[in-house]
Amino acid sequence: MRLLYVGPLNPGGTCLARLKAIKTLHEFVDILDTSFVGQKGPRLYRYAENQACFGMSFLEANRLLLRKANKVQPDVIWIDKGFWIYSLTLRMLKQRGSFLVQHNTDDLFAKHGRWAYRLLRANWRLYDVNFTTNSWNLVEMNRRGGSQVELTSLGYDHERFCPRALSDQGQARWSHAVTFVGHWEPATENYVLALVKADLPVSIYGWNWHKASHLRELSGVVHARFLGGEDYVNCLRGTKIGLGFLSKINRNQTAGRSFEIPACGTFLLAERTAEHQRLYEEGTEAEFFSDPDELVRKVRLY
């Protein structure tokens, strides 16, 4: 059986880790890297292309996929983050006899993704099986019917996320008491603000924190930049407590950091959800909180 893997293979990304795992399970894997989709041209053009779901990189990716499939004749095509694939492309792949697999780690029906996932929301029934990490999407897609849907968990790349002592330089750069690495959302800001008001040390890295309503109070706490690659891993290794805030926009029950923080040997203090409680024994393997007051109490205690 020949498998074609299609996805954005950015260094340190979950797709690259997933491909490596697939290759340990299956001998014949061909690859199409789609990290260029929506990333070509000036910034304004990229924005317009992603909003319209149409443009030079979208068309190029669809052509490359058909050309690659025609060349290697895969029995199975595994597609990660297929927000750029047109229905005609999927139908042509099915006519060639390929079994189509779609894998997605985001909330397919989230309101904020009404543009980015417009094609995927319209076309997911054309896949033979859909893997989702979102328990809400499992229910919603099964209710709509038309394709097999399976719930899978998030995870971590064991080759990257593991306990390892930092160098002296790494210690100087990444040693923190309490850290959250992730994007801004209003609920997350409220949690961070509670820690700041309680005079507890906290450091924040991630996108869109310029949107925070309390920028003055968060001054010196937020390092408004994305952490990728080894910087992200070392930041998790260097902190005493890793915070596991969850996206309310994506309706998450877990996040990648739910696994990556403990994998680095770091204390996980995360929002209390049914999935977190199923994964970890509370008070022994991880700690959880349900509101800002409980978060403050547990940070102060630990």
Image (cartoon, grey):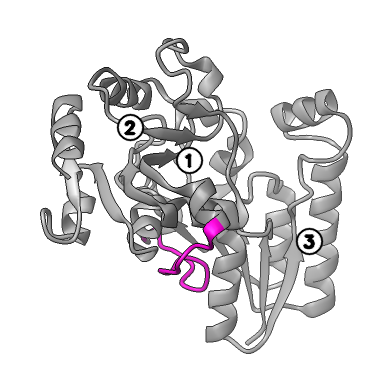
Identity, as a three-letter code, of the amino acid under mark 3? Leu
Any part of residue 94 in sight: no
Residue 201 image label: 2
Name which residue type carries label 2: Pro
Label 3 belongs to which residue?
A: 65
**Residue 119 image offset from top left, x and y in percent:** 63, 39
Whole-number angstrom distance, CA of label 3 to CA of label 1? 22 Å
Q: Which quadrant of the structure image shows residue 246?
A: top left
Q: In the rendered view, does 232 fall on the left or right side of 301?
A: right
Q: State the image coordinates of residue 59 (x, y, percent, origin top left).
A: 84, 45
Q: CA distance from mark 1 to mark 2?
A: 36 Å
* Circle number at residue 108: 1
For the record, the magenta segment spans 153-168
Mark earlier in primary sequence (2, 3): 3
Whether residue 164 appears in magenta in the rendering, the answer is yes
Q: Position of residue 16 (x, y in %)?
A: 62, 65
* Quarter that holds the C terminus: top left
What residue is drawn where x is 32% and y is 60%? 262
Main SS of residues in magenta: loop
Query: Crowding near pointer 1: few (<14 within 10 Å), some, many (20+)?
Result: many
Residue 284's place in the image compared with 270, above or below, is below
Badge 2: residue crowd in 10 Å (few <14, some 14–19, many ≥20): some
Query: Mark 3 or mark 1: which comes first in sequence?
Result: 3
Q: Amino acid at mark 1?
A: Leu
Q: Secondary structure at mark 3?
A: helix
Q: Earlier in the sequence, mark 1 or mark 2?
A: 1
Q: Is residue 267 visible?
A: yes
